Image: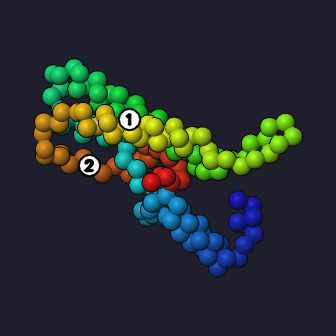
Amino acid sequence: MAFFALLETEERSLLSKIIQKTAIILGGIKSEGGVFVSGAVKIMDLEKQLMQRINQDDLLEVDKIKRYIAIVKQIRKLQSEINKAGVITTTINASQEFIKTNPAINELNKLTKTLITLENSIKFEKMEVPEIPKDNKKDNDEPEVSDLY
């Protein structure tokens, strides 16, 4: 922040625009009134919508939705960690140093396949998707920078 304060007004404006454009390119992050919001769906809204589309008296289907939400949360945590560490990591083993793909990517792929399989097994009854009111509050369980898809 100290560096930013030292810049002239025009330079600050240009740097701010570059940062905004980079954030948009990296993660589908969009600006709403100067505040950056991720494009990810809120977990609470997703669960609410899924629960409305199933027979809530069928405990097996309710359990599937709960598992689905748990997997979505894990996927978002993995995405966040991959964003922090990067897609490629450097491993130091004794005197050797080598570059490899972040192992979290394999776990992310496995969880995504599991999520798709689980989603296909859910018996959705209602085809009309209810409108969920748009809420500008940030949900704390989503990745900060980007989705890897």
User: Which of the two labelled residues, at mark 1 and mark 2, occupies the earlier sequence position?
Assistant: 1
Residues under numbered marks 1 and 2 in contact, where contact means CB atoms less than 8 Å apart: no
Taking the spot 67% from the left edge, 77% from the top edge, the residue there is: 11
Q: Which residue is mark 2?
A: 133
Q: Look at the numbered disc 2 and give the secondary structure of its residue.
A: loop
Q: Which mark is residue 114?
A: 1
Q: Is residue 127 left or right of residue 35?
A: left
Q: Which mark is residue 124?
A: none
Position of 58 relative to 65 (above/below): above
* Mark 2 crowdedness (10 Å alpha carbons): few <14, some 14-19, many ≥20: few
Disc 1 versus disc 2: nearer the observer: 1
Q: Residue furthest right?
A: 95
Residue 106 image point, x, y percent:
53, 41
Seen from the viewer's position, the closer of residues 51 and 97 is 97
Q: Amino acid at mark 1?
A: Thr
Taking the spot 24% from the left edge, 33% from the top edge, the residue there is: 121
Q: Is residue 127 visible?
A: yes
Q: Is residue 27 left or right of residue 41?
A: right
Q: Amino acid at mark 2?
A: Pro
Q: Look at the numbered disc 1 and give the secondary structure of its residue.
A: helix
* Mark 1 crowdedness (10 Å alpha carbons): few <14, some 14-19, many ≥20: some
Taking the spot 37% from the left edge, 44% from the top edge, the residue there is: 42
